[in-house]
Image (cartoon, rainbow, N blue to C red):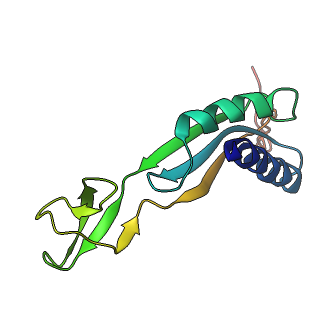
């Protein structure tokens, strides 16, 4: 189950960024996951849940953006969503295409970082009276 090693790596990257940012905490890890990435979304979510337990990022959530397979169709001369997986046929005309434009992704795209609340202080103009 390589999803566990992926989940652990995502947590490692997020923890390293927390340290770089001065010890902040991560609320959400955002990932783009292509249909042809070889990663099973449900398995990744399950592995992430298990991997985060007891870690510094135990409260972090994982949000996955699905990336559909898109191909370049020479017949249509355009980028189209693929149909008839795994044959990768153009969704418009049905022509087989081997030119994958999107759908192979496994990308960490963003970290939502919790900013600790700090009391705000504002300068008071001289001569201001407080009732």
**Looking at the image, is 43 positioned above or below residue 111?**
above
> For the view shown, which residue lies furthest in the top direction?
131
**Looking at the image, is 27 positioned above or below residue 77?**
above
Please give left or right for residue 54 compared with residue 13 in the image.
Answer: right
Q: Residue at x 20, y 74 (%)?
A: 78
In this rendering, does residue 117 appear at all? Answer: no
Residue 106 position in % (x across, y down)? 57, 56
**Looking at the image, is 81 positioned above or below residue 8?**
below
Locate residue 54: give its quadrant.
Answer: top right
Pick the quarter of the image with the C terminus: top right
Please give left or right for residue 3 compared with residue 126 in the image.
Answer: left
Residue 110 position in % (x across, y down)? 62, 52
Locate residue 25: give its quadrant.
Answer: top right
Residue 96 position in % (x across, y down)? 22, 69
> For the view shown, which residue lies furthest in the front direction?
87
**Looking at the image, is 118 positioned above or below residue 80?**
above
Please give left or right for residue 98 compared with residue 1 in the image.
Answer: left
Residue 5 position in % (x across, y down)? 76, 47
């Amino acid at each position: 189950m390589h999803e566990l090693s992926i989940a652990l790596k995502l947590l490692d990257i997020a923890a390293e960024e927390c340290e770089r940012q001065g010890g902040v905490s991560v609320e959400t890890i955002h990932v783009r996951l292509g249909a042809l990435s070889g990663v099973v979304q449900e398995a990744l979510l399950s592995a992430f849940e298990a991997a985060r337990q007891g870690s510094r990022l135990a409260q972090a959530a994982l949000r996955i953006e699905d990336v559909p397979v898109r191909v370049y169709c020479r017949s249509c001369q355009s980028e189209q969503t693929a149909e008839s997986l795994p044959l990768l046929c153009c969704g418009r005309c049905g022509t087989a295409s081997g030119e994958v434009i999107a759908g192979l992704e496994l990308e960490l795209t963003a970290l939502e970082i919790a900013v600790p609340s700090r009391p705000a202080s504002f300068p008071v103009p001289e001569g201001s009276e407080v009732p």
